[in-house]
């Protein structure tokens, strides 16, 4: 599988086994197609009968491509998804990466304060030396499809100032879906997992820090 810890954006983050970062920027389509082909080949290997497996392969490619395109249209630079089940369970979660340049945003502290003021559940954090707002919200789908249970989407958003790039922000938005009480407990566990991943967040393009230090920074991440 592709190395998901490679410095593809302005930061590094350690991913759990079975997760993959799918690039969403315009111009990254060849890389995206190659990564989706990896996912499909692992889920539906060439040993399966072609006449029965190929339609499913096509549907998987369409689903993953449409998901990334939708995220890109909303301003995302990448989508992170679990591509393998964990103990036989498909993980109902994902998160989206966005990088925003806004030179007219004003004082970063005021921006974060405004975000927290608008949130029902928000806290201030320091992420690898940068101030960040963490917000927590839930949305209930009150009109599920026929035969489907009502679903709740839990969303955790970290909005992080880039301390060495004035007016630049990184936003990581995590979503986990749940239905009945047992799956709600799974959703809570997935939120804890995402918060743990945020402890591995490291900037990768800090001025004055030689890129040869990236291997050391990756080692620091994996030692946490």
Image (spheres, helix red, strand yellow):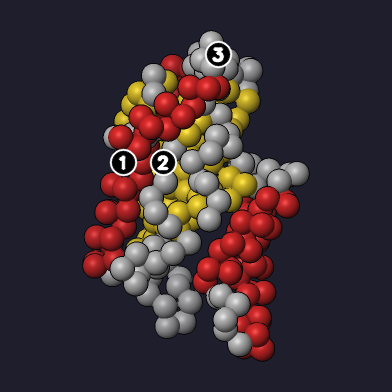
Q: Is residue 108 above or below residue 190?
A: above
Q: Seen in the image, is 146 located left or right of residue 198?
A: right
Residue at the disc numbered 2? 14
What residue is disc 3 on?
207
Q: CA distance from mark 1 to mark 3?
A: 26 Å
Does residue 179 appear in the picture of this structure?
Answer: no
Depth check: 119 or 35 in front? 35
Q: Nearer the viewer, residue 218 or 88?
A: 218
Which residue is at 27% across, 54% downward? Answer: 189
Query: Vertically, is 166 above or below 61?
Result: above
Mark 1, residue position: 196
Residue 73 appears at what percent x and percent y? 68, 48
Sequence-earlier tag: 1 or 2: 2
Along the horizontal axis of the image, is 2 left or right of 59?
A: left
Quadrant of residue 128 in the image?
top left
Q: Quadrant of residue 33?
A: bottom right
Near-viewer residue (130 or 218): 218
């Amino acid at each position: 599988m592709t190395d998901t810890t490679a410095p593809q954006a302005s930061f590094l983050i350690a991913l759990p086994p079975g997760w993959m970062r799918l690039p969403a920027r315009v111009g990254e389509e060849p890389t995206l197609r190659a990564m989706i082909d990896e996912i499909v080949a692992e889920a539906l290997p060439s040993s399966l009968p072609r006449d029965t497996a190929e339609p499913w392969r096509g549907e998987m490619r369409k689903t993953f491509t449409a998901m990334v395109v939708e995220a890109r249209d909303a301003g995302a630079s990448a989508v992170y998804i679990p591509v393998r089940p964990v103990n036989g369970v498909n993980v109902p979660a994902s998160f989206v990466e966005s990088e925003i340049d806004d030179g007219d945003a004003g004082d970063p502290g005021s921006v974060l304060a405004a975000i927290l003021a608008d949130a029902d559940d928000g806290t201030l954090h320091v992420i690898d030396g940068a101030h960040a707002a963490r917000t927590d919200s839930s949305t209930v789908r009150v009109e599920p499809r026929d035969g489907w249970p009502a679903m709740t989407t839990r969303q955790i958003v970290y909005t992080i100032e880039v301390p060495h790039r004035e007016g630049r922000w990184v936003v990581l938005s995590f979503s986990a879906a749940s239905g009945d009480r047992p799956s709600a407990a799974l959703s809570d566990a997935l939120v804890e997992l995402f918060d743990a991943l945020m402890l591995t967040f490291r900037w990768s393009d800090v001025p004055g820090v030689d890129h040869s230090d990236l291997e050391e920074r990756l080692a620091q991440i994996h030692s946490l």
